Image (cartoon, rainbow, N blue to C red):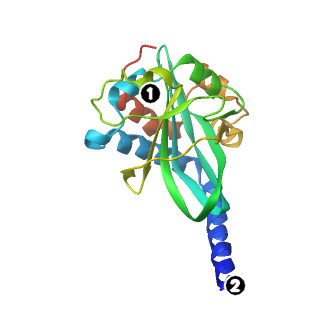
Amino acid sequence: MKTKFALILAMAGAMGMTAFAADKEAKVDDRLAAATDTLNDMMKASDKGIPSDLLDKARCVVVIPGMKKAGFIVGAKYGRGFAVCRQTNGWSAPAAMQVEGGSVGFQIGASETDVVLLVMNDSGMRHLLSDKFTLGGEASVAAGPLGRNMSAQTDAAMHAEMLAYSRARGLFAGISLEGATLRPDTDTDKELYGREMTSREVLTGNVKAPAGAAAFESALKVQSPQRDK
């Protein structure tokens, strides 16, 4: 019995590591396409989508398509995606981001979840522009309210630096991001822009978005055409 149980644990751990490795090897254009699909799908989810008025008020948006979660005694999370911030003339070019974190607990198996973070104020934006920060630690994170026409004047929207939305297997679902770290994905940024760049340069500077990000930019313009900060 012990041998069988140990085998199950080993298989679960191997599945998780394989998922993490596959995510790291995914091509940047494929991740941009996945981020575009995630944003569109989570915005148009009927009466249970991300409220459009909250997206209009967000200073920045972070999209992590297919964030991996694997369990082997201690659960782990890993995902790669993109952030954009509002500028006076529209959205910035996308800066690559990665999220990493763990939750202590007895977990077996692996799952995949799409995540969208709305950065609601200047304080949250300062964290996003830093080298690394902890969700729920340095930056306060709350579960975002659902419903496309819901008023943005909610306690969550007024007090949290970031609002989190997640979707698993096509359905909105809760996810714990407490203790996870969000940091720039410098390797992907270098691949996107042909040289080393910081997230601050991309998100606040006059950086031209790469051709591969055209669909992602278009989705942002459609979902949130508002341009005022």
Q: Is residue 45 left or right of residue 177?
A: left
Question: Crowdedness of circle 2 by 10 Å Cα count: few (<14), some, many (20+)?
Answer: few
Q: In the picture, which quadrant includes the N terminus?
A: bottom right
What residue appears at the point 67 percent right and 80 percent down from the top-left corner?
7
- Return the x and y of residue 150 as percentages of the image width and height: 29, 29
What residue appears at the point 26 percent right and 42 percent down from the top-left corner?
46
Q: Nearer the viewer, residue 112 or 30?
A: 112
- Return the x and y of residue 87 as percentages of the image width and height: 51, 17
Type of amino acid under label 2? Thr
Image quadrant where residue 17 sits: bottom right
Type of amino acid under label 1? Ala
- Return the x and y of residue 228 as percentages of the image width and height: 42, 13
Question: Crowdedness of circle 1 by 10 Å Cα count: few (<14), some, many (20+)?
Answer: some
Residue at label 2?
3
Image quadrant where residue 11 sits: bottom right
Mark yes or no: residue 157 visible.
yes
**Count of numbered marks:** 2
- Return the x and y of residue 90 as percentages of the image width and height: 46, 20
Q: Secondary structure at mark 2?
A: helix
Q: Is residue 171 left or right of residue 88?
A: left
Q: Is residue 138 above or below residue 178?
A: above
Residue at label 1?
156
